[in-house]
């Protein structure tokens, strides 16, 4: 099919989405993007991580969508890298469904990024009722990251200022408009990560390079209510936990030195081993703890080698 001049022009913004069995959320996100005021300036890329629902067929509903279908779940980092390496935009907008953008959101984010010279801009995430959901955190110390791995998340997220833009270190949920040249300069994301800590990696590189990450409270991105998920099996919970610990060890070694990275691994191994022993003695969540130990020792991150994930 012959392309029109508008289709031939390089897009200004590459919107990057990753799907995994969440077709309703992805569909709603795509519908909101199609209504964006600067839609001709956007290219929308979706990488599907081996979904079994309608995600791999959404290009039939959205013909301009650039869809990459992966046969299995290769993890968030691999999927993001595939999208970024094929993206043509000057800016990357990494969206985390169920994010919904208003028609004016992306043009306003882009204008603010160019006005301020910041490396990245984060809109405020809000609930369907308008309640602010975005939380911020300083770049963590290794001990803080270890506790977050152990507990499943940081316990001390803070609410950002509601009345003014603010410079932040690390933000959740990770909705980021980033200058593409910066991610290209670091050769995209380190694929020693699997599912976790990719957002911390981006923020760390930006902040350590002296670049600004600005949070804008007046440009909310609405998060639609998520459907209730079936609790994962012990095997999947164990794989996710191992991926979290191993990725955190990679981050610690990269940004605090090799010795600190190995120290983190040894502490994590001691924690995982003690959990396995306790599980054997008490018969509480034994299959999870034993699977976590096996995954940690063998270095199992989420990388497409697993089936049924």
Image (spheres, rainbow, N blue to C red):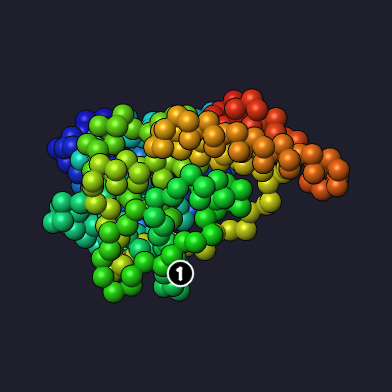
Please indicate whether residue 195 sits to the left or right of residue 10 in the image: right
Please indicate whether residue 309 sits to the left or right of residue 44 in the image: right
Residue 143 vs 124, above or below: the answer is above
The location of residue 131, given as percent across then percent down, is 44, 72
Residue 159 vs 100, above or below: the answer is below
The location of residue 91, given as percent across then percent down, is 24, 43
The location of residue 143, given as percent across then percent down, is 52, 47
Residue at the image point whose x is 50% and y is 39% from the top: 248
Residue at the image point whose x is 26% and y is 70% from the top: 164
Q: Observer-nearest residue: 191 or 26?
A: 191
The location of residue 120, given as percent across then percent down, is 26, 50
Counting the numbered discs, the total is 1
Q: Observer-nearest residue: 287 or 75?
A: 287
- Determine if residue 37 is in view: no
Q: Which residue is mark 1?
A: 128
Mark 1 closeness class: few <14, some 14–19, many ≥20 residues within 10 Å: few
Residue at the image point whose x is 82% and y is 48% from the top: 284
Q: Quadrant of the N terminus?
A: top left
Q: Quadrant of the rendered structure where residue 270 is?
A: top right
Q: Quadrant of the rendered structure where residue 180 is?
A: top left
Q: Observer-nearest residue: 121 or 137?
A: 137
Please indicate whether residue 291 sits to the left or right of residue 5 in the image: right
Q: Observer-nearest residue: 57 or 190?
A: 190
Residue 178 vs 293, above or below: the answer is below
Residue at the image point whose x is 40% and y is 59% from the top: 136
Tell me the element at label 1.
loop
Q: Quadrant of the C terminus?
A: top right
- Determine if residue 71 is in view: yes
């Amino acid at each position: 099919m012959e392309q029109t001049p508008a289709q031939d022009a390089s897009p200004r913004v590459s919107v990057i989405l990753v799907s995994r069995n969440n077709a309703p959320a992805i569909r709603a996100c795509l519908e909101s993007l199609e209504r964006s005021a600067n839609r001709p300036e956007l290219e929308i890329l979706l990488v599907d991580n081996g979904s079994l629902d309608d995600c791999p067929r959404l290009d039939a509903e959205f013909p301009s969508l650039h869809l990459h279908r992966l046969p299995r779940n290769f993890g968030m980092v691999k999927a993001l890298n595939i999208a970024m390496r094929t993206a043509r935009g000057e800016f990357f907008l990494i969206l985390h469904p169920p994010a919904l953008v208003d028609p004016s959101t992306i043009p306003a984010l882009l204008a603010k990024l160019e006005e301020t010279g910041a490396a990245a801009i984060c809109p405020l995430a809000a609930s369907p009722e308008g309640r602010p959901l975005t939380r911020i955190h300083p770049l963590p110390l290794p001990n803080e990251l270890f506790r977050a791995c152990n507990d499943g998340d940081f316990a001390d997220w803070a609410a950002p200022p509601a009345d003014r833009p603010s410079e932040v270190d690390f933000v959740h949920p990770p909705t980021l408009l980033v200058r593409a040249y910066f991610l290209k300069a670091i050769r995209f994301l380190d694929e020693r990560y699997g599912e976790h800590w990719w957002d911390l990696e981006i923020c760390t590189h930006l902040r350590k390079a002296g670049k600004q990450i600005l949070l804008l409270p007046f440009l909310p991105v609405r998060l639609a209510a998520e459907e209730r998920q079936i609790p994962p099996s012990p095997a999947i919970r164990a794989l996710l936990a191992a991926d979290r610990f191993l990725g955190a060890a990679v981050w610690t070694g990269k940004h605090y030195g090799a010795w600190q990275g190995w120290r983190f691994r040894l502490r994590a191994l001691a924690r995982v081993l003690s959990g396995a022993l306790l599980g054997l003695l008490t018969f509480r969540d034994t299959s999870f703890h034993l699977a976590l130990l096996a995954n940690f020792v063998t270095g199992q991150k989420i990388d497409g080698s697993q089936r049924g994930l």
